[in-house]
Every structure is written in structure tokens, then in C-alpha cells.
Image: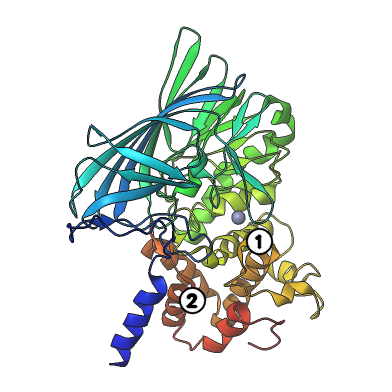
Amino acid sequence: RGTALAAALCVLASAPLAHPALAAPGKPGDPRHSAGAAGIGDPYFPAQGNGGFDVKHYDVAFSYDPATKRMDATTTITATATQDLDRFNLDFRGPKITDLNVDRHRASFRRDGQELVVTPRLKLKNRKSFTVVVKYAGTPPVITDPDGSIEGWVPTDDGAFVPGEPQGTPAWIPSNDHPTDKATFTFHATVPEGVTAVGNGQLLSQKTRKGRTTFVWDSTEPMATYLATVTIGKFKVATSKTPGGIPVYTAVDPALATQSAAVVARIPDIIGYFTSLFGPYPFASAGAIVDRAPNVGYALESQTKPIFSSAPSLSTMAHEIAHQWYGDSVSPKRWSDIWLNEGFATYAQWLWTEHNGGATAQQTFDSSDNYGRDAAAPFWQTVTADPGTADLFGDVPYNRGAMTLHALRGKIGDTAFFKLVKDWAAKHKYGNVSTADFIHQASSVSGKNLKTFFDVWLYRKGKPTTW
Ligand code: ZN
């Protein structure tokens, strides 16, 4: 009984938040088919994602001219219905749509803010696969986040810098934009000759014809939409391999080449070290894109190709590489769980620093930038496991998140802790996780009751003093 009630409450709590303007029921007279929900039910970004289908693959083919900032694109989405649908939504903030087909029939659609509402000619049956082809052209937008930073499609002097976390990907790809709907991606990017387009995954081909080059990139493991990028510019390209034989492709803005050379050269070492701690590198390829996008000012762990908007420090490089395990392969179920990305990547950064002969993780934990802060500091007044949208990428999920892991390591011991982080990456490879999943796994690996521990570190305000 108790369980049934809890389950019922759970369903209520996770029901997609209806958008009054979009939540009209299915057509009268057809009780079976109904409209897919306009959002996936994430309280931080209620309009993100959609109900009623699951995307398997995105094929994104476009040309882009840095001089005019014009994109001409065709995105083909292969999805499976998870209910009988007479209408469904995609997330899209991109330029004008010129054509939209579902299963080869022209579909009717309307745009409502970031929602693209599609009514296919034929209704879609639950569990059946369907194909959506969207053609669009114009300049994709820059998107401003709740923390004031920008993402989406950010034009640079010679191309575009393309970060998508937490809500930038619909600037250029009509998508089911939530970390819980991972899919494979293929990109076909055509740019003027001399310009390089770098996407996630492996370069399948690069062909120049009549002054334009088409790059085909294949992202063969499931990827959350926010990790998609095709970043474009004049780059110096280099390739190498990790100690385990993973191919590494790096693209660096020539203006930053000297400054970033030493850090970029360490990518194989960093991957080698993290492989020894966290288990096998989760993807078929690795790399980095170093570009000049001063108005962005942050780096992002885009899958297999982290992007840096300026020359990275070694420690930032380590952070973005660690995200390939924690964030990219193992992704959050809800944005409020962001510390599972940022706390892990930050802690990995501390471990790398120690391994590389710098401060020990204990010293970093103790420092005045971390545990050493005054108990009255505003830092201690944000809840790690629920920081709010304006502080998603703030101090707390990063540093208090990393401190949580270091404190946990002290509490359960090195053997249990390193087994836990490795098992976590293995068990949830290409999946999605919540804070509750982590607490459960930590308790079971260590055999300890960690309720109070996680309460003070993750769920309560205030500086933890005993744990
Ligand atoms: Zn990060």
C-alpha cells in the first residue's frame, strides 16, 4: 500500500508539466491518439524535451557561410512513438522552416516560442518508427541562459562556436532537447574551402568541390542533445592516439596555437590517467576544439570534442575530459542533478592536479577557495543537489560537489570510493542517473548508512561540520 501510494505520487511528480497553450487534448472522436506532451517534465526547463516519442538518430546536413552567417539545413530525425500520436512537439529555435515532412507526407506545423508543434498527415502508432524531415534556412540564434551566459549558434570571425548546454542545441537542430533522450548523430557540414567544420565523433569523409568542403562526422554512441556541436573556423588540425589506441583529433585556432600547444599535447596522458581511475574511455574517438569566442568565455564537454572558447589551462582540459565519463556517458536525469556532472569533473580535475605534481586533493579541499571558506559565506547557502537554474554552472555544483566526493572518499575509504566511481561509470554507461541513484550505489558499495552524510553535503544549506 505504502509503495503503491509512493509510486502514484511519483508518477504525479514526474508528469510532464503541461503548457496551457499547447496541451490541447487529441482530436475529438479519436480517443486513442493524443498529442505528445510539450515538455518532458524537468522542473528547471519545463519546455525542454517532449512526450510521446524517443529519438534514435539525427542526421543533420547543412551548409554554412561564415561571411553571411546563413545556414541551409535539412535535419532527418528517426524516432519511435511511445504512445499513439496525432500530434507531437519538437524543440526548435532555429531559422525559418521551409518544409516539414513526416514519413514522406507534408505535415502541418506551427511554431510557438521554442516549441515546434507538428501534426502529421497520418496518425502515428505506438512503438512504430517514424521519420521527420525538417528543412530550414537563415541565421541560427544565440541563446541567453538563466545565468546570463550565451550558447547556441555563436558566430566568430571565421565561423561559429557551438555550445549547447543546457538549452542551446535547438538553435540549429530541431530536437527532443533533454539529456534523457540520447541518440546517435551524423553531421554533413559544408563550408567554404579553407574552413574546417568539426563535429562530435569520427570524421568519415572530407571532400572539396567547387570551392566548398563537406565534412561528414559520425557520432556512433548515444549522445545527449546538449553535447552536440559542429564548431566551424580556420583551424590547425592534428591527430594522435591515446595510450589505449583511441584516435584523437584536435582543431586549434592558429591565433591560439602557441598558447595551447602544451595543454593539447597532454590529452592522451589525461585520458590514460582517467582510464586507470574511471575505467575504459567511453567513446570511439577523442579530441578538442580550441577557438576564439571571447563572448562565450567558458568551455564545454561536447561529446568526444570538448570545446574551449580560449586557450585552456591544463586543469580545464582535465575537467572537460573527465566529463566524457561523468556527464557525457553517464548523464543526469534532471538538470537539478548537475553536481553529478560538475562535482565529478571538478574532483577529477583535483585528482589530475595531484597526479601531475600539483596540490593534493586534500590541499585543494582544505583551501580557502573550498572548505576553508567562512561559514557565513553565501557559498554555503545553496543546496548542492538543487542549485536552481541561475547557479547551474556556479561555484556550488562544481566545488561543493567535488568537496562532497572528497569527503565521501574520506568516509568510506579509498578502496570503496574508487570502486564506486568506476562501477558508477560502468553501470550507467550511456545512461541517465539521479542523485538518489548515486546515494544508493555509494551505500551499497561501502555497506555504510550514508543518509546523514549526503544530507549535510547535498540537501542542506550550511557548512557541514561533522559527517
Ligand atoms: Zn564542467
Q: Tell me how the rendering is colored.
A: rainbow
Which residue is rendered at x = 22% and y = 37% of the image? 103
Residue 334 in sight here = yes
Up-down: is 28 above or below 97?
below
Nearest the eye: 18 or 277: 18
Q: Is mark 2 on a helix, strand or loop?
A: helix
Q: Which residue lies furthest to the top in this view?
A: 210
Q: Name the residue type under label 2.
A: Ala
Quarter of the rendered image showing ligand 1? bottom right
Picture coordinates of residue 267, whole percent (x, y):
58, 43
Up-down: is 354 above or below 174?
below
Picture coordinates of residue 177, whole percent (x, y):
44, 50
Residue 390 - label? 1
- Horizontal arrangement in the rendering, residue 247 relative to residue 255 (left or right): left
Which residue is rendered at x = 60% and y = 65% of the image? 343
Residue 304 in sight here = no
Tell me where residue 253 sits by quadrant.
top right
What is the CA distance from the residue labelled 1 to the residue labelled 2?
A: 34 Å
Q: Name the residue type under label 1.
A: Ala
Picture coordinates of residue 399, whole percent (x, y):
68, 66
Picture coordinates of residue 246, whole percent (x, y):
44, 40
Q: Is mark 1 on a helix, strand or loop?
A: helix
Tell me where residue 52 sits by quadrant.
bottom left
Q: Mark 2 points at which residue?
A: 416
Quadrant holding the C terminus: bottom right
Q: Residues within 10 Å of mark 2 (few under 14, many from 20)?
A: some
